[in-house]
Amino acid sequence: MRASIALAALLGLVLLYWIDVHMASWNPERCDLPARDLQPVNHNLSAPAVLLLHGFPDNPQTFVGLHATLQQQGFRVYALTLRGYHRSTLQPQQDYFAVSLAQDIFDFMKLQNLTKAHLVGHDWGSVAVQAASALQPQLFQSVTVMAVPHNMLKAFLFNPQQLALSWYMLFFQLPVLPKLWISHFHGIEFLWHTWSPGFTPTEEHLWSVLEDMHCPLVLHAALGYYRENLGCALLLPGIACIVLCFVLSKAVLRCARPTAPAKKSSGSGDRLLLLWAAAVLLLVLATQMNQAVVPYPASLLLGQAVHETRLMAWPESVQCPVLAIAGERDGCISPASFEIAMQDRSFFTKGSKLVIVPEAGHFIHLEQPHLVATEIIAWILQHS
């Protein structure tokens, strides 16, 4: 009986992941979205190039003010759309690894004939610029990260508050529920208000974000960032621990009851172990058949995700000058996490600076635009 219930539960889980994937194809008419990239007005090829990369839940329109301010200073400024945040940038194989985001930056620079650039990233855009500067630091004169610092793993380890603030990362690993929450229960508005307490974005910008996230394909891709990059750290160890605990508990029970009928105990235990093995195998096969059926791709089984997670978590050093900007009231990534992540100055071989912006939350550049722009401009000019 217990074995049947366990098998039914696991089959139900696989079914939910299958539904989660196919939800992306619902209501395709909602995906006729306008392009939101911001292009430079200054076409002077000798002007320093600045690439702006947005995060979640957001789009390039978040940088309208910063884009204009930087252009007034004579920079060539591009605000790019992260892969998956527009129908034209969707990835058939759900490839939203940090290293792939970095490759998009390299490809864009090649397309625009840029040999050098300054990087500015917010949230997932910050992760993208961290990956790019780690892989090819010679291309970048400076790096500015907002809302997400380097060394986030260290922040998780030494700042327990951050674990609580990052509840949504675990939630996004679940099938179906996160999509229903965002699409039908004002999930995006909740995140904006929680992460930036007291701040209300303009109606026009919030509407553009909601329009993007109500496209099932874009929403699936946006959640894919968390599932691709974090699923290996959250789900596979969980499955392994469940299986291991089950095996150990059966071994303990057998040792504790040596006089129990061997045939009955062995048969029941073997059947349950067989069912667990079949369930894990089913998850693996589902992954191979459709890389998006579960929150981690088949490449994870080959160690790609582990390699890339290590690259982002513990690179040997940062070879570009780094400006880190955090909001004092950030309800997503706390300022304490920034302080922990940035405290090892030897890690930043080309220099670093941490700015904690008062009266600002997660969307710092929108809440304190003048202060943030001033810091970024000074950092860029210092390293041009």
Image (spheres, helix red, strand yellow):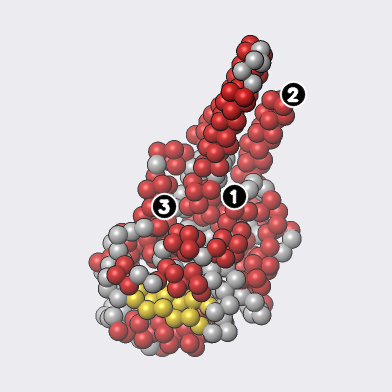
Q: Secondary structure at mark 2?
A: loop
- In the image, what residue occupies the spot 49% across and 34% down? 288
Amino acid type, residue under disc 3 in the picture: Thr
For label 3, the crowd category at 10 Å Cα-Cα, with few meaning under 14, some 14 to 19 and many 20 or more, is many
Relative to 23, residue 318 above or below: below
List x then y, in percent, for residue 380.
34, 81
List x then y, in percent, for residue 61.
54, 73
For label 2, the crowd category at 10 Å Cα-Cα, with few meaning under 14, some 14 to 19 and many 20 or more, is few
Marks 1/3: CA–CA distance: 16 Å
For label 1, the crowd category at 10 Å Cα-Cα, with few meaning under 14, some 14 to 19 and many 20 or more, is many
Q: Secondary structure at mark 3?
A: helix
Q: Which quarter of the image is occupied by the N terminus?
A: top right
Relative to 125, residue 271 above or below: above
Amino acid type, residue under disc 2 in the picture: Met
Q: Which residue is mark 1?
A: 173
Which one is nearer the viewer's eye here, 49 or 362? Answer: 362
List x then y, in percent, for residue 351.
30, 76
Marks 1 and 3 close (CB-CB < 8 Å): no
- In the image, what residue occupies the spot 31% across and 79% down? 48
Mark 2 vs 3, N-terminal side = 2
Mark 1 vs 2, N-terminal side = 2
Q: Which residue is mark 3?
A: 309
